[in-house]
Image (cartoon, rainbow, N blue to C red):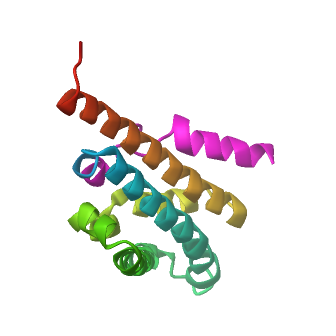
Amino acid sequence: MAELILIFISASLVNNFVLSYFLGICPFVGVSNKTENALNMGMASTFVMTITAAVTWPIYHYVLLRFNVPFLQYVAFIIVIASLVQLVEMYVRKASPALHRALGIFLPLITTNCAILGLALFMVLRDYGYLESIIFGFATGVGFTLAIVMMSGIREVLGFGSVF
């Protein structure tokens, strides 16, 4: 249990993908103009990251390693990420058309968010178990959300508020 807590704190705060590794900069800068949009983008990214971790771990361990083709991990992970993002986009378009319009092009661009691919690759490199991978995916998404919401707050104050 302590190891899972350490993974969560490390991935979300200490080794934040945006602030430490500079992964996911495009949506970080593009959607952080309003806090509401940033929070929604962060939640969508967190959902995709968590599900990506849950889906790519068994694919890597039970398919790619079993058939001795781990060199296909990039292709397999990108296919999984693209499919998950399409599912999220279809859901958001149906459930909240206003949110879909607000996120605009940045919602489908979650597919090209290198933080999500980085998550899948770091998960393999660090040799996490299944539960650890899911915690790592969720924590990475939480860290992304924290960073993008903090940046949007700063941009709102500087853009619309009075500094002094």
Give coordinates of residue 28: x percent, y percent.
Answer: 30, 48
Give coordinates of residue 79: x percent, y percent.
Answer: 40, 80
Query: Please, which residue is most extreme toward the bottom here?
Result: 67
The answer to whether residue 21 is visible is: no
Query: Please, which residue is most extreme toward the right here?
Result: 1
Question: Which picture quadrant has residue 133?
Answer: bottom right
Query: Please, which residue is most extreme toward the top here?
Result: 164
Task: Give me the residue at 57% from left, 50% from top.
Answer: 139
Give coordinates of residue 75: x percent, y percent.
Answer: 39, 78
Q: Is residue 127 left or right of residue 147?
A: right
In-front residue for pair 63/33: 33
In-front residue for pair 54/161: 161
Residue 98 highlighted magenta (yes or no):
no
The magenta-colored residue range is: 1-28
Q: Is residue 83 left or right of residue 99?
A: right
Question: Which picture quadrant has residue 85?
Answer: bottom left
* Dominant secondary structure (helix, strand or loop) of the stretch shown in magenta: helix
Question: Which picture quadrant has residue 42?
Answer: bottom left
Residue 20 highlighted magenta (yes or no):
yes
Task: Give me the residue at 59% from left, 84% from top.
Answer: 63
Task: Give me the residue at 52% from left, 49% from top.
Answer: 142
Give coordinates of residue 12: x percent, y percent.
Answer: 54, 43
